[in-house]
Image (cartoon, rainbow, N blue to C red):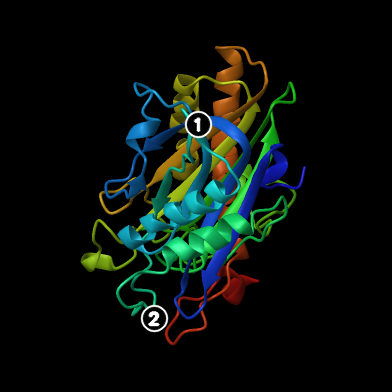
Amino acid sequence: MNNLLTDISGVRVGHAGDTALASGVTAVVFDQPVVAAMDVRGGGPGTREGALLDVANTVEKIDAIALSGGSAFGLEAGGGVQAWLAEQGRGLNVRGAVIPIVPGAICFDLLNGGNKNWGRYAPYRDLGFQAAANAAVSFELGSVGAGLGALTANLKGGLGSASAQTKDGTKVAALAVVNALGSVTVGDGPWFWAAPFEMSGEYGGRGLPASFTSDMLKMRIKGGPAATAVENTTLAVVVTDAALTKTQAKRLAVMAQTGFARAIYPVHAPMDGDVVFAASTGERPIDLLAGITELGMVAANVVARAIARGVHAATALPLPGALPAWRDRFG
């Protein structure tokens, strides 16, 4: 176990980004189609193929997931991932017509100081293609891919990942892009809200403060009174090797959203676009009640850890007035 999403066999992750743009794309590519579902809790989401993932709809399996900066412009990243898959001959075969199925979601990073004057067409389709081409078992965390331009209320955001196993050896892992309205740390200190779930000092081992003050519990939100419904989002992809139906994958996504509440303060606000994708590679049978309940419990913990790791690993944008990274202040 490498504490990455790719600890699930058959999953690869690739990044592409542009430092001058201060934005990028992350592609989660599956070696074989996987059962998938989605849960949306934020008030300002931006998604691609979201309706397809509804449990009432026909298509059950997907080939990849595209995560992108760029707000609505970034939805084109899915087309780039789709194009790369098509070149590999991957996709749903409908009487000879091959259609790669690539849901996706975006976060808003248009006001982070990067040069967004890209002309007539945004670069996200090309970045999506490159991210898919770069997909591998080993991948970087922090200010990379869709997390390149991510920010939180008080520190640079980023991309994180974590993994774990249930008591019977079923694996579950998460990847998170942290561009939250709220804060991932307690007050103005180095402590992560997700500290109780940390393993092996993966985000600094600082624990929680010895006591909480009223100042620590004050609301800190990106943009203050000027915050809007499109500026913020945390995105997560949760993958397990348990054999789940689409309905069960939906329940896993619902339970995994609890990890957001364990790691971000405040969360699921009208100004967030929080989304969790859940996917199953279908390798291991699982008990339909206790097994899935434990899986969801562990998935929520893994999501919280991935969120904290994304901020812990982030580096500040090389731009005037950029928010500091956690490591700049506390590293």
Above-or-below relation of 96 to 327: above
Above-or-below relation of 295 to 226: above
Visible residue check, residue 298:
yes
Q: Could you say where residue 229 lies in the image, as x and y percent from the top left? A: 25, 56
Find numbered disc 2 in the image and state the secondary structure of the residue it sits on: loop
Visible residue check, residue 209:
no
Quadrant (top left/top right/bottom left/bottom right) for the N terminus: top right
The structure residue drawn at horizontal position 55% and vertical position 53%, both measured from the top left corner, is 84
- Inter-mark Cα distance, 2 to 1: 40 Å
Q: Could you say where residue 159 lies in the image, as x and y percent from the top left? A: 55, 58
Q: Is 168 in front, or is 59? A: 59
Above-or-below relation of 142 to 260: below
The structure residue drawn at horizontal position 27% and vertical position 46%, both measured from the top left corner, is 43
Q: What amino acid is labelled 2 in the image?
A: Asn
Find numbered disc 1 in the image and state the secondary structure of the residue it sits on: strand
Q: What amino acid is labelled 1 in the image?
A: Asn
Above-or-below relation of 219 to 304: below
Q: Could you say where residue 189 lies in the image, as x and y percent from the top left? A: 53, 65
Q: Is 48 in front, or is 82? A: 82
What residue is disc 1 on?
93
Marks 2 and 1, the one that precedes in the sequence: 1
Q: Is 283 on the left-hand or right-hand side of 46?
A: right
Q: Quadrant of residue 171?
A: top right
Q: Is 172 on the left-hand or right-hand side of 273?
A: right
The image's mark for residue 48 is none
The image's mark for residue 115 is 2
The structure residue drawn at horizontal position 66% and vertical position 16%, both measured from the top left corner, is 285
Q: Is 184 on the left-hand or right-hand side of 87?
A: left
Q: Could you say where residue 267 lies in the image, as x and y percent from the top left? A: 37, 48
